[in-house]
Amino acid sequence: MPGVLQGGSMLTLALPKGRVLRAVVPLLARAGANAEALLSDDRSLIREEPALGLRFLLLKPDDVPTYVEYGAADLGVCGRDVLMERSCDLYQPLDLGVGRCRMVVAGAIGRAAPTGVPRVATKYPRCAADYFARRGVQVDVVYVQGSVELAPLVGLADLIVDLVETGTTLAQNGLEVRDEIAAISSVLVANRASYRLKHDRVQRFIADLRPPHPAMQEGQGGRGAAGA
Ligand code: PRP
């Protein structure tokens, strides 16, 4: 019976609050989790499902790999963008096929390249620096935490590196995609020790998450998602 604790150990999952949580909850419901309780607007950061042997930690998305890598959680749900930006020593046993978007370089529509070294605003400084370095293009990378699309509009930057899902934010701010850096989706990440020591329990949980169609793909993980 999916999700029911069968003599196995408890699993702790680190989940990102917000948009991705809403996409992931239907998958967790396949493993028996109470979707309503997970999405409820209460401020408790730990949601327990003792009968299922599951415990959920609700975190800022960027913190998920930290909790999993240090063993505070056995598993986590993490965007490939976060893994690309950070060096995390985690297994990535399953692409969840949700949270799909693209990491792109974008700039103002019709604006010519600057004569000097272009400035690039992003919340992904490492991805941006790697991308331009691979092309031998010198840039100044400026870190911003959000609303990245604002930067070219007010002279903070010539270009941005950011995520695009529907394209609405770019379009509404007069920006266009100049290049795609990577396809992004949410992946299940696993603490290396948990993956070995709780192997059967983790495998049962992964089997419960899988959809009845081939959209999800398995990929044994190494470090990060080699640039999510
Ligand atoms: C993300 C991303 C873009 C926007 C893209 O931002 O950084 O700004 O979504 O979505 P779209 O292509 O569907 O318009 P988010 O909403 O997470 O907020 P942020 O700008 O504060 O990072």
Image (tube, grey):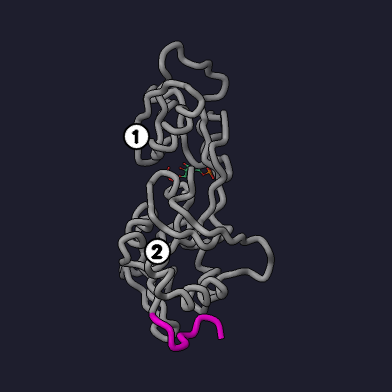
Which disc is residue 192 wearing?
2
In percent of the image, x 57 and y 20: which residue is there?
A: 110
Magenta segment, principal secondary structure?
loop
Give the magenta part as a residue range.
Answer: 1-9
Q: Residues within 10 Å of mark 2 (few under 14, many from 20)?
A: some
The residue nearer to you, when weighing 216 against 90, is: 90
Q: Which amino acid type corresponds to the residue marked 2 in the rendered image?
A: Arg
**Marked residue nearer the N-terminal end (1 or 2):** 1
In percent of the image, x 47 and y 87: which residue is there?
A: 6
Instruction: Give the total of numbered labels.
Output: 2
In percent of the image, x 46 and y 47: which residue is there?
A: 81
For the N terminus, the quadrant is bottom right
Query: Tag 2's secondary structure?
Result: helix
- Whether 47 is drawn above or below 181: the answer is below
Residue at which label 1 appears: 143
Whole-percent x, y for residue 39 in the image = 44, 68
Whole-percent x, y for residue 10 in the image = 38, 79
- Whether 137 is drawn above or below 93: the answer is above
Q: Is residue 203 left or right of residue 63?
A: right
Q: Is residue 179 left or right of residue 162?
A: right
Q: Tell me the distance, in whole angstroms, between the alpha carbons under discs 1 and 2.
A: 31 Å
In percent of the image, x 44 and y 23: which residue is there?
A: 158
Q: Is residue 154 on the magenta stretch?
A: no
Q: Residues within 10 Å of mark 1 (few under 14, many from 20)?
A: some
Q: Quadrant of residue 207?
A: bottom right
Query: Tag 1's secondary structure?
Result: strand
- Whether 225 is drawn above or below 143: the answer is below
